[in-house]
Structure formats: C-alpha cells, structure tokens
Image (cartoon, grey):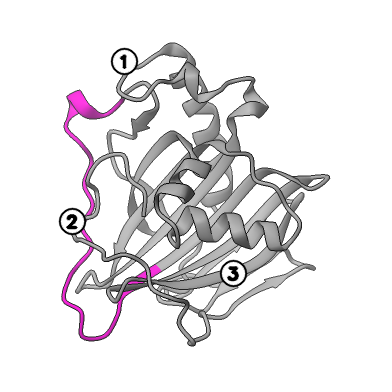
Amino acid sequence: MTTLVPLLLVSIAPPTVDPAAQPPACVFDSATRLLTCHAEPAVRLPIPGGFRFLGGVVFDLGEKARVDRRLLARVEGDRVEALLVLQFEGFLPGVEGRYAFSIPPADQLAGSNYRFSPEPVGLGGHRWVHNTWAFDNAASARESPGYESDRTIRFLTDQGLELPPELIMSRFVRAVGEDARRELILFYMEPLALHRHTLADFPDGGAPSEAYDRLSAEVTARSLAIFRALEDPATTTP
C-alpha cells in the first residue's frame, strides 16, 4: 500500500501469511477481450490488444484487510513493458475502519517524481483521485516484504516474467460502498527505462520539472485510453 502522501486514512498492520480463501472471480474473454470481475465492486474493462491476462494474487495485510490484485501485462520476450493492475481491497470482518482519499492542496499537487490531477477523474460513473509517481518497485518490495510490490514481483517471476525495478505509475483510487470499507485501485505502469529515464532524473523531494510533467502527461494519457472504457455492471450493459 505504497503512497506518496497520506491518502489512506487508516493504519495497516504488517502482512500475514496468505489466506486460504479464494480471490473473487475475474474472467477474461479472449474473443471479446473483455475482463469481467465479479468482485465488490463488480467491473468490466475492455483490454487493448497486446495485453495478456496473467491471473491474480490474494493476500492479507496483517489482520486488517484483504487484497486481491488482477494483473495484465504487455510483454516483450520475458520483460514486462506495461502492467495493468486492478486492486480490490477491503477490511476483514470485525475490523473497524474506512477508506478516505483526498486531493492535496494546490501547493502540494506536484513534485519532482509525482503529480496529482487537480480535480477528481470520472471513470465508469464514479469519481477517482488520480496521481502519477516514479518509484523504485524493487526497493518497495525489500522494504515491505509481503506487501503489494513484493507479492507482484514474486507472482510475475513465477510466470517467468521480469518487471524492471524503476517504474512510473498512473493510479486511480476510490472508496467503495456507503460505509467506505472497500477500495478499488487501478494502476497502469511502465518502466522508466523505456523512456530513457532513471529515478536519478526525478530525485525524491525535488522540485517539479518539465521532463517529469511531460512523461506524467504521456503515461496518464495512455492509462486513460484504457480506463475510460471501465464499466460498472450495476449501471451499464455490455
């Protein structure tokens, strides 16, 4: 649950072992290239050509919340060149808490390695907080074993795939349900190396730059080209 600023207004304990429960069903129809997830919330998402559905990984964050990640990747050889992640997360029964997200003040919208959209983004009939972030995924995995970065790297490695360590993400997040006990996060990630950049170009804590703003806008546009097609089955038909 890596964040740039304190978007999630709850605390999560260290991860436990994998739960025995099966993750929510997600079905990818290769003929229509439609991904349908019968989770809470249920979603439908047309997947562009070039991406393949890899499956999912489910785990608990301590004794607080359960995470289910569904992954799709565009791959060159055994190297991931773009990664889509749908993350369903919710508090476990008996655990108090709610998810709450907000957009930072105007003077905190951007830095050397991140940028927030100044207004909520509409996708699938809902409003989402959006940001981009350039980060070291391998370092996140080392620092937080058992959390999202670590679980995702291991999942991809088991499938014979390599995810470069330095990434830029475009992320959309919203709380789900009137009680806000669930959240849905949409990630689109690309390796910085594809753009001839490293994290040294975007030092943590530095000032915004034209180079990062340009890259952020490009990655945001590619993520929106995919996620704009997101549907809520409760309010739409296929």
Q: Is residue 238 left or right of residue 149?
A: right
Q: Which sits in the foreground, 141 or 39?
A: 141
Q: Is residue 5 above or below residue 200?
A: below
Mark 1 falls on what kind of element?
loop
**Rendered location of residue 221, percent (x, y):** 53, 34
- Number of callouts: 3
Three-letter amino acid code of the residue under disc 1: Ala
**Rendered location of residue 155, percent (x, y):** 62, 62
- Give whichever of discs 1 and 3 has the lower sequence position: 3
**Rendered location of residue 7, percent (x, y):** 24, 48
- Give whichever of discs 2 and 1 has the lower sequence position: 2
Q: Residue furthest top?
A: 210
Q: Are marks 2 and 1 in contact (CB under 8 Å)?
A: no
Q: CA distance from mark 1 to mark 3?
A: 37 Å
Mark 2 falls on what kind of element?
loop
Q: Is residue 36 left or right of residue 75?
A: left
The residue where tag 1 is placed is 207
The residue where tag 2 is placed is 9
Q: Are marks 1 and 3 in contact (CB under 8 Å)?
A: no
Q: CA distance from mark 2 to mark 3?
A: 26 Å
81 magenta-colored: no
**Rendered location of residue 122, percent (x, y):** 38, 49
Magenta residues span: 89-110
Q: Which mark is residue 56?
A: 3
